[in-house]
Image (cartoon, rainbow, N blue to C red):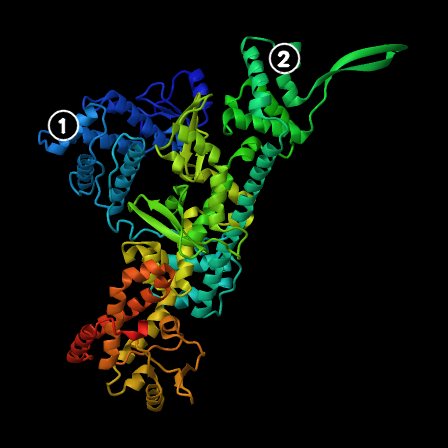
Amino acid sequence: MEEVSIPSDQSEVRHLKSIDGGIDSSEPLKPYVAKHNCRYDCSFLDHPLLHKQAAEEIAYTIALRMTRLARQKGNRLHPHFRFHRKFFGWLFQYLGSDKSTHFKVSVKKSLAAGEMPLRDDWQMVVDAFRSVAVRSKGNPFINTENKLSKHNIIHRIGSLLNLCSTRGIFPVFILRGIKHAQKHCCKRRCLGDLKHRYISEMDVERLIGGYLQDSANEHDIIKEEHNACIHALASSGLDITGLNDAEIIEAIKRFNQERLDELRRCAEIEFYRGWDVYQEGQRLLEECDLSYEDDMRGPLEDLVDGLKRGINPGSLWSRNHPARELLYGELKSTKIPLNYWKGKTVDRVQTQNKRQRLPCKVQLARLLTVIDGRYGMPVPRKFYESAIRKAVRNSYNRHAHANKFWSRDYLAINTDTMLAAQIILLIDTGLNTEVVDQLTVDCVKDTDNPTIKIVYGWKKRGGKEVKAYVRTNDPAHRISAIEVISRVKEMTKRFRKVAAAGTHPFCNVKLDEPKLAEKLFIRDSPFAVGNIIYLVAGLFSIQVNIIPNFKKRYPSVGAYDFTLTSIRPTVALLDFLQGRNIETMKARMDHKSINVTSGYVVRAASRMVMEQQIRAFQKDLEAMIIFDIPGAAEKLGYTAEEYNERLARAERTGLGTICDHIRKGVDGQYFSKKRRNCDPIEDCPECPLMRVFPALKENLVDTFLTRNWIRQNEGELRSNNPARWEKVWLRWLAIVEGVIDKAKTSHVVSRTTLNEAEELARQFGTDIFLPLI
């Protein structure tokens, strides 16, 4: 068990607890983290290879990292600190070893001088750490062969080093985890996999019946995942007994969609609640009858200076001061007649100084004008001078409907509104939580289509830029993602202005990262110590605290264990169930490997869908490879007459397929039996009628031509119309690639015919490929 270091003086403990989760760095190498109620002894950083100032900065960064982690029971040190201590122990030993190289010497000199190491040299050190951390034997960090444990250690150290990079201690680097380390871990559950309530065995038997027993062997899926999906579906009150697989798939799809829609509806309500309060605050600022610079600054500073000189706040000078009249109203002498005095009827008049109170909205408008003009942002109340603090309390007492943060809600975004905005963006864009959390102010770019915008983000884990296409107007919802971004930008402008300046006239400003002013979701942290305002980006460190409050306000989404990480898998699963193939999903989610995409979309419902698609696709491929084989009709499930009639009336589409619903009219024009405006390029990939690929030379030539043309024009097709690329051409590429691979590996298709078809396609080139022009 880790030894806990806490202050011995009880008065010091009470003082440090009052900083409400902040960091006390009065002892630079032993910072106190109030959130964990313990000191973290970083004296191991006092090393000859590390400059004193750099050691203190790293110690503060370690404490800062601890504030983003959950508090341990019994006021114990967080277990991540143990690995941080081991890493720096390894680093000093590695740099001080006898086997010195040029990059070791360079990094050693830079750290000893208090300078940032060169990026390439530091990357070599990070690579050396990774090679040691993945060892099975002689690993100084952990004694296990488990891939996931090693991956977690790399992730913990990487999180600390990334924070050091953002604070300018170390240069930017790349530290990759262990590939497929989380392959056999439980996937992040989508919304439809979360149970609404406890389901007893009796409820399971009543609502599910024997479905799980009947289908467990039929579908090759993980039993736990399948059971969780079906149990969650049953928890909604749906009686699954007697439903077939197709009905179960539709029920799961509908269940996920309903939960996603309900979550977005609740987020919209919460966002508008914060936006309406902010809009009211801006209206009050515009309607205020006084100006801070011209009418209020002089009297207010005179009052503050007088109180600092020791004048009694209750004195006549203080009570009659013009600043108090501006905030409360004029103080007037009023004569009150006393007709009854100590049991006797008398004629007597008493004079009292009674203040003519300002109208409620006028007082609030003036107070907001003072806070906005004097402080520039809604700072914590401890930074207010006593006169302003009293005015805030007085105005708050007159607003019984207001919450304790009412003044900040009028001037800036609160964390609840920020959470609602992130939920809407996660649903509409399908991006990762970390990408949305760290979006920049200029994340929206225009496209050729005025109704479509691109939302850009940066994915730290992959070290690359990601994007999503969204509509400017969303008729299905009250507010679109683009409007949310615009309004969040408006509500955070005061924080951004202070972050850009880096200074404040009444307190010190500390930034979470150097380019904080460029972030979209910027806020002040409640973990502020002393005379410091700490500005941070995003909600990652406080999600666990604000999501429960969101659930309490909206019971419809609070009835299950909802987290932000459940949104992206739900969006991906619904897209896949809508008909997008996995290659299209890989391109849309910007994954390097299809294995990553499968972790999002390959779930209980999608496995059932894919099994049905595989059966249909197998018939399509069989039609290609057994066209000229005796008994082909029986293998496809047709009678000989039906099969011959099908092929006799089929017409080639020019894409390697044949279509059995195209007809030739009396006027010589071709038309579709299915519909008049059928387009092979647009409609064939999604056509419910069976696609057939006969193993004829001309069809194989068409197939090769299709593949060659798409590959050659891929860059142009992507850039001209990304949405059409995903919807049409990427699907066709997956289809023809699958057909060609199947034909090459089949022992039925003639190798000579296949080679001749490929050679003919090469000779024809792509310029004469008319069907795609």
> Is residue 315 among what the camera can see?
no
Q: What residue sits right under mark 2 in the picture? A: 318
Left or right of 432, for residue 274: right
Position of the N terminus, as image quadrant, is top left
* Image x and y of residue 679, in percent: 39, 74
The one of 386 and 186 positioned closer to us in this rendering: 386
Left or right of 476, for residue 447: left
How many numbered marks are there? 2
Q: Which mark is first along the chain, 1 or 2?
A: 1
The mark found on residue 360 in the picture is: none
- Is there CB contact under 8 Å for labels 2 and 1? no
Residue sitting at 29 percent across and 67 percent down? 733
Quarter occupied by residue 437: top left
* Image x and y of residue 140, in percent: 19, 35
Residue sitting at 38 percent across and 17 percent down? 8
Within 10 Å of disc 2 (Cα), the crowding (few <14, some 14-19, many 20+) is some
Disc 1 secondary structure class: loop
Q: Looking at the image, is 697 positioned above or below residue 46?
A: below
The mark found on residue 96 in the picture is: 1
Position of the C terminus, as image quadrant, is bottom left
Residue type (three-letter) at the residue carrying disc 1: Gly
Residue sitting at 48 percent across and 54 percent down? 260
The one of 7 and 203 positioned closer to us in this rendering: 7
Q: Residue furthest left?
A: 99
* Image x and y of residue 218, in percent: 36, 69
Left or right of 112, for residue 192: right
Quarter occupied by residue 712: bottom left
Q: Looking at the image, is 164 positioned above or below residue 236?
A: above
Within 10 Å of disc 1 (Cα), the crowding (few <14, some 14-19, many 20+) is some
Disc 2 secondary structure class: helix
